[in-house]
């Protein structure tokens, strides 16, 4: 009996390790700590001009100027810096398993820096693959912020964190993909509107720590069972 329990403990430990590896999956994060935009551009489907980089409260952000509806993007051809090695792989993994991946980012907007902040501002995001697949959250988005005229006229600064499940972009039927684009939608009636973004990440869910906690609970239960049968 003890031998079987020890085998069970070993199996649980192996499953815990394997689960953590599987959950970590492919991921990429843009935090602009190298003081460059890492390939992000002020264009939805072009390759220039480069997005600006600014330090806001000790954190580096890219600034995306509201222009066309697809206002800023990065793709497999433009991506540079540390994220270049993992961007396309992370996007391909998310396209292949949208239920297991999410986009997260932090945003910041100071209406006082705009020529005119306008009467509304809506943020969204999109994902595009080399096969032609395209999906977007739209504006308004169920996941991303909207500001009304009263808020924009208040003089307040707005910021927050966003999580978008990759399922919001739909399912790509054409994989595997070797080219990808990730971008932001900015919709409003202001002029000179710049929205700042940082910690833009594509990562798997649940995070490894979630599986680790569950695995630790399982392992603890098996250890307790072993003590009762000793």
Image (cartoon, rainbow, N blue to C red):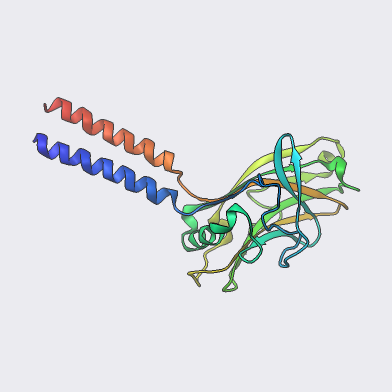
Residue located 82% across and 35% down the image = 156
Rendered position, 105 above or below 127:
above
Q: Position of residue 15 (x, y in %)?
A: 29, 45
Quarter of the image with the C terminus in it: top left
State the residue in front, 100 or 81.
81
* 229 relative position to 179: left or right: left
Residue located 56% across and 74% down the image = 131
In this view, the residue farthest toward the right is 115
Q: Position of residue 91 (x, y in %)?
A: 54, 60
In this view, the residue farthest toward the left is 1
State the residue in front, 143 or 87.
87
Residue located 43% across and 39% down the image = 209
Residue located 72% across and 39% down the image = 159
* 30 relative position to 55: left or right: left
Q: Position of residue 21 (x, y in %)?
A: 38, 48
State the residue in front, 16 or 222.
16
Quarter of the image with the N terminus in it: top left
State the residue in front, 205 or 40.
40
Q: Position of residue 176 (x, y in %)?
A: 48, 69
Number of marks drawn = 0
């Amino acid at each position: 009996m003890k031998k079987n329990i020890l085998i069970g403990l070993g199996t649980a430990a192996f499953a815990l390790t394997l689960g953590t590896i599987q959950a970590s999956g492919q991921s990429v994060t843009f935090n602009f700590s190298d003081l460059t935009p890492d390939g992000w551009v002020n264009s939805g489907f072009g390759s220039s001009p480069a997005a600006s980089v600014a330090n806001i409260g000790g954190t580096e952000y890219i600034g995306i100027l509201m222009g066309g509806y697809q206002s800023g993007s990065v793709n497999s051809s433009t991506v540079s810096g540390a994220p270049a090695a993992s961007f396309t792989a992370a996007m391909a993994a998310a396209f292949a398993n949208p239920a297991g991946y999410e986009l997260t980012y932090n945003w910041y907007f100071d209406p006082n820096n705009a020529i005119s902040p306008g009467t509304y501002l809506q943020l969204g995001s999109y994902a595009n693959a080399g096969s032609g697949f395209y999906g977007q959250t739209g504006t308004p988005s169920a996941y991303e912020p909207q500001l009304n005229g009263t808020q924009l006229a208040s003089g307040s600064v707005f910021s927050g964190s966003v999580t978008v499940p990759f399922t919001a972009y739909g399912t790509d039927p054409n994989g595997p993909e070797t080219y990808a684009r990730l971008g932001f939608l900015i919709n409003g009636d202001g002029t000179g509107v710049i929205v700042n973004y940082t910690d833009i990440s594509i990562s798997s869910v649940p995070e490894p720590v979630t599986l680790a906690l569950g695995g630790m609970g399982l392992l603890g239960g098996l250890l307790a069972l072993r003590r009762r049968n000793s």
